Structure formats: structure tokens, C-alpha cells
Image: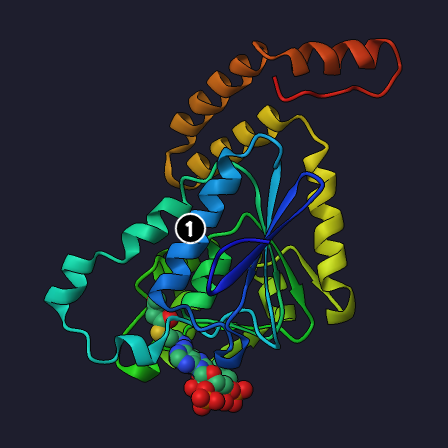
Amino acid sequence: MSNYQYIFTEIDDAVGKIILNRPEVLNALNRPMITELVNALETFNKNENIKVILLTANGRSFAAGADIKEMKEDDPIYLEKLDQFAEWDRMSLIKKPIIAAVQGYAVGGGFELVLSCDIVFAAENAKFGFPEVNLGVMPGAGGTVKLTKTIGPRKALEWLWTGEYFDAKKAYEYGLVNRVLPVEVLFDEAMAFAKKVATQPPLSIRLIKDTVTKAVDLSTYESMQYERKNFYLLFATDDQKEGMQAFVEKRQPIFKGK
Ligand code: CAA
């Protein structure tokens, strides 16, 4: 357990779990909550014993977006000076896998949070979308960009302009979530998956995330050059020696993250 006001953190073996905890407002993401979330992510990122981070939420919904009551009187100069999305940028620097388990609404900033995670398990009752247009604004934490890169501009515009929500099945069809599960098994399945990834060689996991992330932004040529360097780099690890030796000796490898 941890000293946060709007989230909880727990450690289960090599999995660091972060639980959004403002269920009375469907985990609306006020600014202190984002600060806590980023601090918790960075703390787990630095902890050598944690291999994977699992992000979940208390209550009937994952997160219903930024806290509208907190921001409704904001003006542009205040927002520019506040630079609140710099906190979101810090999330993109987390090297360890982040797995999200999503139930109920994950909309607005809540959906942006989902799009900031590496793997997403969704409950059958999950609903995604960007309702910002209904408030006279638009997503500001990367939503338009990440949605467009995943599903293409036409589909993205449809959802961004209408502000309508789509269900987990549609999200799966669009490649926005990895699995759709009954809500009763969502958290256990997400934890089981997190634990499975946590047994893999950590430096491979880290550099695979790094390379896949770069592949989204760089050209094919540049990302293949980048991939090659990371491939070579892994030959400096004990885990590469152990993994290949174990294969030759027909035994299970013991990875140490070195
Ligand atoms: N901000 C502040 N409070 C919120 C909230 C939000 N984003 N979403 C829900 N709440 C509060 C409600 O005001 C309500 O509080 P009270 O009981 O005090 O009235 C409580 O949470 C429960 O919500 P509802 O009664 O509305 O629940 P519902 O099941 O009827 O509806 C919902 C669920 C459709 C998600 C609805 O709550 C809703 O439309 N929420 C707002 C969604 C939204 O517009 N999000 C985008 C925010 S802007 C953004 O995220 C910008 C960005 O890029 C960062």
C-alpha cells in the first residue's frame, strides 16, 4: 500500500499494480491524480524487482476523462503556464510494459490513458470514445494523434466529431485492445498475463518495447536500423547467453535481467 490520495499501489510478485481510486466520479482524472499516477509509474520503473506494471481502476468505470469541474474555468494562458500535458509526456518514458485492465467507461482522458498503455485487456462492458467535442473542446493528451495512428484518419474523425462511444468488441476489431473478457475474469486474466511477461528476460522486453514504440514514429528504414542496434545490444547480456545455452542443453532458462 502507498501514500497517495487518488490512487493505490500494490506489489504482487514482480508486478507493480496501480489502481485509480476516485470511483465516486468514475475516476475522473484531476491533475493531482495524474501527478500521482506518473509518480507511481516512475517509482515502479526504477524498482529493479518490478518487471511489469498493471493499471486498473476501482468502481464501475476505468476513467471518465479529465475532471471537467476542475478545468471548466481555465484560460489558455493558465493552461500554457501549467503545461499539464508534460506529465503525460513522462508516461511515454516508462521503459517497462504497462498493461491496462479496463471496465466500464474509458473516455476522453481515460481513453487517452488507455492509448498510453502497451497492452489493453477490456471487459465486455467497456466503452471507449472521445466526448470532448460535446464540451466544445477536443482531446489534448495525445488522443487525436494516437487514435489516428491506430485506426486511420477516417474512422478517427468519425469518433472524434460525433463524440460517440464504441464498445469493446469494436475496439478489438480496430486493434485498440488486445482481449475482450467477461468483467468477472478481467483483473485475474490481466494479472496472469502481466506475470507471464514478468518471467521473460527483462532487457529483451524493454528493448522490444523501445523498438516497437520507435517503429510507430520512425520510417521503416530508420526503425529497422534501430531494431538492428537493439538486437546487437542484447548480445551483451547474460540473459542472451543463458537463453541460448538453455536451448542447447534442452532446459528452461533462468533469466536475471543482466
Ligand atoms: N469530470 C468530472 N466529474 C465527472 C466526470 C468528469 N469527466 N465524469 C463523471 N463525473 C462525475 C459526475 O459528475 C457524477 O458526479 P455526481 O454524482 O456528483 O453528479 C459521477 O461522476 C457519476 O457520473 P454520471 O452520473 O454522469 O454517470 P453515468 O453512468 O450516468 O454517465 C458518463 C457516465 C457517460 C461517462 C458521464 O459521466 C459523462 O459523460 N462523463 C463525462 C465524460 C467526458 O466528457 N469526458 C471528457 C472530459 S475532457 C478530457 O478528457 C480532455 C482531455 O483530453 C484530457
User: Which residue corresponds to the image point at 34% horizontal and 84% vertical from the top-left?
Assistant: 134
Disc 1, SS: helix
Amino acid type of the residue that numbered disc 1 sits on in the rendered structure: Val
* Residue 57 image position (x, y, % from top left): 58, 65
Q: Is residue 174 above or below residue 96?
A: below
Q: Residues within 10 Å of mark 1 (few under 14, many from 20)?
A: some
Q: Give the residue number, with chain letter if any, for mark 1.
A: 38
User: Which residue corresponds to the image point at 54% horizontal and 76% vertical from the top-left?
Assistant: 23
Tell me which corner region of the image, top left, top right, bottom left or bottom right, holds residue 100. bottom right
196 displayed left or right of 22: right
* Residue 102 image position (x, y, % from top left): 61, 65
Q: Residue furthest right?
A: 250
Q: Quadrant of the N terminus?
A: bottom right
* Residue 218 image position (x, y, % from top left): 37, 35
156 displayed left or right of 63: left
Between residue 11 and residue 253, name the one nearer to us: 11
User: Which residue corresponds to the image point at 43% horizontal and 61% vertical from the top-left?
Assistant: 112
User: Which residue corresponds to the image point at 49% horizontal and 24% vertical from the top-left?
Assistant: 227
Q: Is residue 219 above or below residue 29?
A: above
